[in-house]
Image: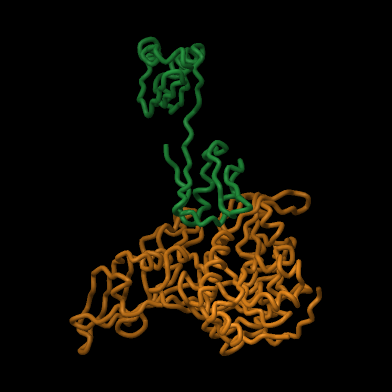
Chain colours: A green, B orange
Amino acid sequence: MINKKIVLKFPPSLVDQPIICKLVKDFDLEFNILKAYVTPDEEGLLVIELKGKDKNYNEGIEYLKSKGIIIQTLKQRIMKNDEKCVHCGVCISVCPTKALLMDIDTMKVEFIEDDCIACEHCILACPVGAMEATF
Amino acid sequence: MGKTIQEINEKIKSGKAVVVTAEEMIEIVRKKGESRAVKEVDVVTTGTFGPMCSSGAYFNIGPRKPTIKIGGGKCYLNDVPAYAGYAALDVLIGATALPEDDPKNKYYPGRFRYGGGHVIEDLVAGKDVHLKVEAYGTDCYPGKELDEFINIKNLRNAILYNPRNSYQNYNVAVNLSDKVIYTYLGVLRPRMGNANYSSAGQLSPLLNDPFYKTIGIGTRIFLGGGVGYISWYGTQHNPDVERTERGVPKRPAGTIAVIGDLKQMSPEYLKGASITGYGASLYVGMGIPIPILDEEMAFYTSVSDVDIYAPVVDYSRAYPQGTGEIIKEVTYKELRSGEIKICGKGIPTGSLASYYMARKIANELKKWIEEGKFLLTEPVERLPGWEKEVKIIR
């Protein structure tokens, strides 16, 4: 049995197709939608928890890929609370991807969310609880 | 051609004093030299903002009916134990105190989310704080318990008192072992994965007056957003460490004990800290003005991060075992660049003290002096180490 939280990115051409319905009927998978976001002319984004037998799960994933859907495992989202941050910079030395940087002019800590891999090292390092994890 | 503190104060009162921060002074002295700097600058302001565990607050809760004597009993503030060994209504809370039910490092590494430092921050922020007292009762103080909320505005007195703050220099911590360690200098990754330090360097008060020529007992300072005073030399004050040719200590050296009215202070400059695997603490913001009395003081206050060296110490072995071994000396300029090099390996650096806040404090103090709200003081008594013979090498 596999139970995973995954992020699906749909190309615009697939947004109107009953993809998830197929996962249930053809592959006997259970799903729980955590987040869904679709805009016309843009890709759709769906965060789901998908559960089923290993074989079914893998076949279901293959089916999604064959349709051109991009699949990623769900990462936690890390946020920096600017009201709490004192800009000490102790988070910078533990960040493996340099997503936390010191702006050498302002001497303030900047967080580049796109570079964050949600390892959470900064959360343990921050003395004032300014780094927070959300889903 | 020297100046006196009295003369500088006259200029401050008439709004004519020239005040610059320790950061700005570096350029002024570099461009114009010490003799012109003395003529042009009257005061240099410094600042520092870092976790300072040797901090605490004491207060008097005011009279109660029936009377109660906390002294000799037990006292808790938001479940954090406070010291109850004084008279009837005086209580002391230290920054590192923890609730009795805090798991501490039992679930390693502990998170220490709320301790004495957080109580002090909450008090300063004007939040109601839960007070619980168990007393034994006497004929003159029959009361045996209190269970109520207190607020700083209703306390008779509230005073911040810190036995050791504003370390003149400090270690840079690395970890040579194969596992992550959790220290008061932060999380240290194995095999020198990072290097952490904690000093405002060129903005730091005692590094701008390395022989305590103007900073002494009685000096009026910026403390936690309010006005405070240096009450004594700090515990562990040690002026007799190795110094550079400029007289700047290369090891942790001088410290000061400070005191001030907590009621005037602000939570922006007093912040509870939770140091993973280590404990609770208090971020303290402090700034000290340095009168530019002569060329010597102009020279000292022009110190920059390239002139200040700190020792790199292994916190997995050398520090806990007290071996005194030092891996290397690095400058604050290197530390501030984001990476130091040890044996060819680039090691990312992080600071526990906030340079941003140190700069903000130096600027705030500068504003106070420019507005004539803050006058300088002559030390009442000197800090040990001030009598050192100094030969300035430029």
Front one among B136 and B196: B196
Quarter occupied by the C terminus of chain B: bottom right
Front one among B53 and B206: B206
Residue under the image location 79 percent in, 74 percent down: B245
Q: Residue furthest top?
A: A26
Q: Is residue B98 visible?
A: no
Q: Position of residue B253 (x, y in %)?
A: 65, 75
Front one among B209 and B7: B7
Residue under the image location 63 percent in, 79 percent down: B291
Image quadrant in which you'd find residue B361: bottom right
Q: Is residue B378 left or right of residue B91?
A: right
Residue under the image location 47 percent in, 15 percent down: A64
Residue under the image location 20 percent in, 89 percent down: B139
Q: Is residue A61 visible?
A: yes
Quarter occupied by the N terminus of chain B: bottom right
Relative to B141, residue B92 above or below: above
Relative to B104, residue B225 above or below: below
Q: How many marks?
A: 0
Front one among B75 and B330: B330
Q: Position of residue B216 (x, y in %)?
A: 59, 84
Q: Position of residue A41 (x, y in %)?
A: 45, 18
Q: Position of residue B296 (x, y in %)?
A: 73, 80
Q: Is residue A53 left or right of residue B345?
A: left
Q: Residue furthest left?
A: B66
Image quadrant in which you'd find residue B20: bottom right
Image quadrant in which you'd find residue B250: bottom right
